[in-house]
Amino acid sequence: MDVANSNMEIQRQKQWLENDSRFIKAHQQPAVLIDLASSRGVEKHRLLRHTGLFYEDIITGNEIISPEQFLQLISNTRKLLKSDDISFLFGHRLFPGNYGNLTEALLCSGNLYQALKMLCCDSLTSSPLLAMHMQMDDQFCHIRFFDTCGLQENDRFVLETMMAAISQLSRWLSGNKPVWKYNISQSPPEYIEQFHVHLGENITFNAQADSIVIPKDCLFQAWPNGKATAYEVAKQRCEAGSEQNGSLFIAAVVDFLYREVRHSPSLEQTASAFCMSPATLKRKLKKHRTHFQALQDIVRKQVAVYLFNYRGYSNEQVAEWLNFSDTSNFRRAFIRWTGITPTLLKAS
C-alpha cells in the first residue's frame, strides 16, 4: 500500500493531543456550561467537584484543562440538573462564542460552507470532544461525528450539543431556520420533543452514523453580514494557529483510515504511518476506550452506507470499492457492522 503522502502529512504533526492532554481553555466552552448551570441555581463548587478546577482559576483566563476534566464537568452538570434541554441550550450558546480568530471568521463568513470550514479547521477550539468529518458530493454536505476521547455515558449529551450549536450558528447568521436531516445512531429518548424544538422534524434515530446531512444549495447561499476581506484574514490566522496547536490523536487516526479506506490499512501499517509501534498504537487507543478494529469498522461501515444510500452502488461495487475479495465476505462484514443486510438497508 502506498501511503507516502499520508505519512508525510502525519509526520509533520508535532504534538498528538489525547484525552488527558490540557488544551481546552476553561474560560471558553467549560465556562459557558458553568454559567448556564449556575443560571439554573446550581452552585459553582458543586459543578467543579472532582474536576481539579477552582472557579477563581477559571476567571483568570489562563486555566487550560483536559477533555477528561471537561467530561467530569459535563457529568456533574447532568447529574445536578437532570434537565432534558440543557445540552441543546448549551449548544445554542457555543457559537460564535469568544474564541478570538475563530469567532471573527464565523462572524464574517459569507455562507454556511465558509463557517463549517472554520469549525473543522479549528476543531480543538470548536469541538474538542467530538471530531467532525465533512464530506461533499453533488447534492449534499455530510457532517459526521466521531468520539475522540471516550465519551461513554456523555456521548448523547455531547452529540446533541454539537448538532444544536451548528444549527443555531446557521440560524443566527443566515436569518433562516435550517431544514437539514439529522441522523442519530442511538434510540429515540423520552425527551424527543426537545429534538423537534431545537433541530426540527427531520430526524432519524437508530441510524448507522451520527451525522448532519445538508443540501448543497444551503451551503453557498449568501449570508447578509458576510465580510470577504475580514473573513480571509481571520481564516489565515485560524489556519496558522491550528498548525501550531497539534491534533487530536483519535481524530487523526480516523482521518487516516478515511483517506486509506480503499486500501484497508492494517494495524501495523497504521502504526507505521504514525511513527510508532503496533503495541504503542494499541495502548493509545485503549486509553481512549476504543481499539483499532472498532475504528476501522466504523469508517468502513460509514463509507459503505454512504455508497449505498447516496451513490446507488450495488453490493459488488461497494465490495470492490472497499477492497473485499468477494461479495460474500463483504456481506458478512456489513452484517457485523450494522446488524442488517445490504438489501434491508437499501429497502429502508
Image (cartoon, rainbow, N blue to C red):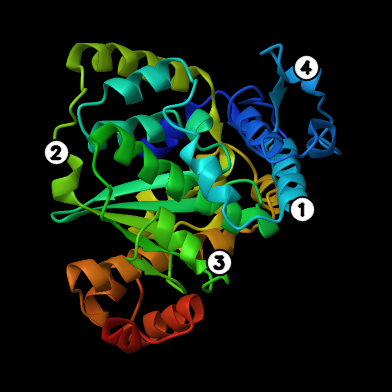
Label 1 secondary element:
helix
Look at the image and tell me whether residue 322 can be seen: no
Q: CA distance from mark 1 to mark 3?
A: 16 Å
Q: Tell me which label, 4 or 3, sits earlier in the chain.
A: 4
Residue 79 circle label:
1
Tell me, for residue 142, which label it has, or none. none
Nearer to us of marks 4 and 1 is 1
Query: Horizontally, is 19 left or right of 194 in the view?
Result: right
Q: Would you say residue 84 is visible in this rendering? A: yes
Q: Amino acid at mark 1?
A: Lys
Residues under labels 4 and 1: Cα distance? 23 Å
Circle 4: element type:
helix
Name the residue at 64% across, 50% down: 278
Q: Which residue, given by chain and number where applicable, does mark 3 sit on?
A: 191
Around disc 2, counting alpha carbons within 10 Å, would you say few (fewer than 14), some (14 to 19), or many (20 or more)? few
Residue 228 pos. (x, y %): 18, 17
Q: Earlier in the sequence, mark 4 or mark 1?
A: 4
Look at label 3 and name its amino acid: Tyr
Image coordinates of residue 184 in percent, x first then y, are 45, 65
Relative height, residue 257 to residue 101 (above, below): below
Query: Disc 4, disc 3: CB below 8 Å?
Result: no
Q: CA distance from mark 4 to mark 2?
A: 42 Å
The residue lying toward the viewer, choosing from 230 and 208, is: 230
25 or 322: which is nearer to us?
25
Mark 4 closeness class: few <14, some 14–19, many ≥20 residues within 10 Å: few
Q: Amino acid at mark 2?
A: Gln
**Mark number displayed over residue 221:** 2
Residue visible at 41% across and 27% down in the picture: 96
Helix, strand or loop status at disc 3: loop
First reached walking from the N terminus: tag 2 or tag 3: 3
